[in-house]
Amino acid sequence: MKLGIIGAGIIGLQTAYHALKNNFDVTVYEQSSSLGYGASGHNAGVLHVLQPPFINRKARMAKKANPLYDRLSEELGFRVRRLPLFLVYRNTKEKTLALTAGVILKSLGYPVTRVERDEVLGECPDLTKSVNGALKVEGYGTVHPLEVLESLAKWVEEHGGAIRYATKVVSVEDTGKKACIRSIDTRECFDKVAVTAGPGVREIYNGYLPRIGFYKGVMVYTRLNCNAIIAPLISKSRSKKTKGGGIIPLPDGRVILGPSFSETNNPWDTSVTPEEAFETVEIYIDLLSHEPDIQGYTAGTRAKNLSKDDFYIGKKGNIIVTAGIDSPGFTASPLIAREIVSLASLP
Ligand SMILES: Cc1cc2nc3c(=O)[nH]c(=O)nc-3n(C[C@H](O)[C@H](O)[C@H](O)COP(=O)(O)OP(=O)(O)OC[C@H]3O[C@@H](n4cnc5c(N)ncnc54)[C@H](O)[C@@H]3O)c2cc1C
């Protein structure tokens, strides 16, 4: 069975990996000459456990897919840093909220406990002493997104998959018997095509798609001393469209502050102004005991499903389409890939 995949982001590469394991003949088309052009190369690298609103498909997928990264990292060689999440509180009002949230999360089956200030500051000595305690959630992890993409691409090519870099797809069409991919100078037909083009899906696919919005997230790299992901229980950056960011230690010792959340018209926006970096640091400065040492910054753009706050994975004829794979799409990608390959196996 020949499978064409449009986009070498995390969804496209995980799909290629899983399809090759299931004996598909795989070709991936990528518009960029290197990996990581989209959100998959510009995200916070958190392997999530908790995902508001906790009960929808993307929340369940992330929770279930997260542990799969341990086996994948052993097989492919990228690093996973396992660490807890502390949802920190500072005053009595926030503590009461934490107690209530803890009970609800436990009843939903999440591994949550309440811990005192000493345990939080023990893991993260650079936090201010005004942190009173936290809800601790086990099972989180971080990765370097580009390292994951590179090791997946290497595996795919070593196992017979082809990745055509610098090949922008113009359109995909279903002929009834096949699905054909047209790039600027080629047209190639496959038994099935998976469109995993992130924000690029609209330009190439003219079937049904949910309404998509684009939201930029700025991430600032620092050198804080922290061995846990820290997120304020009540976040200045949390809204209905984002769960807010945090203080996020990466596998190489750098620590991210962010990501922030703002609307953009450019689906591939990775620009950061000094003002945006400053505003992102400001969200977390109250949690720190001193000014962080800034090492640099980056940004990525999320493609969110505005019709329904969930991932869209659909099949029409010989074409499988993904859209609105926002956070926690990186975490959930092994299961999204399995779903795409199951759909590709259907007539
Ligand atoms: C700031 C930020 C922080 C995030 N943090 C996290 C996190 O901590 N944890 C988590 O789980 N998720 C996180 N996410 C979400 C996660 O990054 C995305 O869900 C995921 O990367 C989406 O992957 P994708 O493969 O669908 O899209 P993309 O990564 O955008 O990949 C699409 C690929 O398709 C290619 N393409 C597009 N159009 C064409 C075309 N016409 N022809 C050929 N190729 C094409 C693009 O070049 C790109 O390489 C974050 C996202 C952002 C923006």
Image: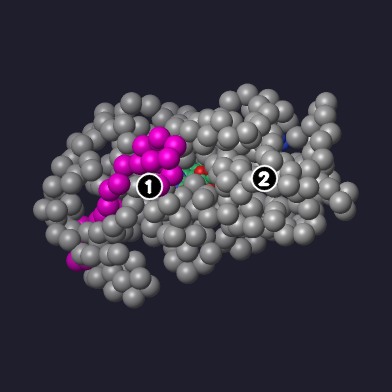
Hey, what amino acid is under mark 2?
Phe
Q: Is residue 200 left or right of residue 151?
A: right
Q: Is residue 152 above or below residue 310?
A: above
Q: Is residue 96 left or right of residue 31?
A: left
Q: Which mark is residue 340?
A: none
Quadrant location of ligand 1? top right
Q: Residue at x 38, y 27 (%)?
A: 296
Q: Position of residue 42 (x, y in %)?
A: 49, 36
The residue at which mark 2 appears reads as: 24
SS state under label 1 = helix
Q: Residue at x 47, y 40 (%)?
A: 43
Residue 339 is a magenta residue: no
* Cβ of mark 1 under 8 A from ligand 1: no
Residue extending furthest toward the front: 23
The residue at which mark 1 appears reads as: 70
* Closer to us: 174 or 52: 174
Q: Position of residue 297 (x, y in %)?
A: 41, 30
Label total for image: 2
Q: Is residue 335 visible?
A: yes
Q: Position of residue 103 (x, y in %)?
A: 29, 74
Q: Is residue 219 visible?
A: no
Q: Residue at x 19, y 44 (%)?
A: 124
Q: Look at the image and give the residue range highlighted in magenta.
A: 70-95
* Closer to us: 94 or 18: 18
How would you rate the neighbour count of disc 2 (Cα within 10 Å): few for under 14, some for 14-19, many for 20 or more? many
Q: Is residue 180 above or below residue 244?
A: above
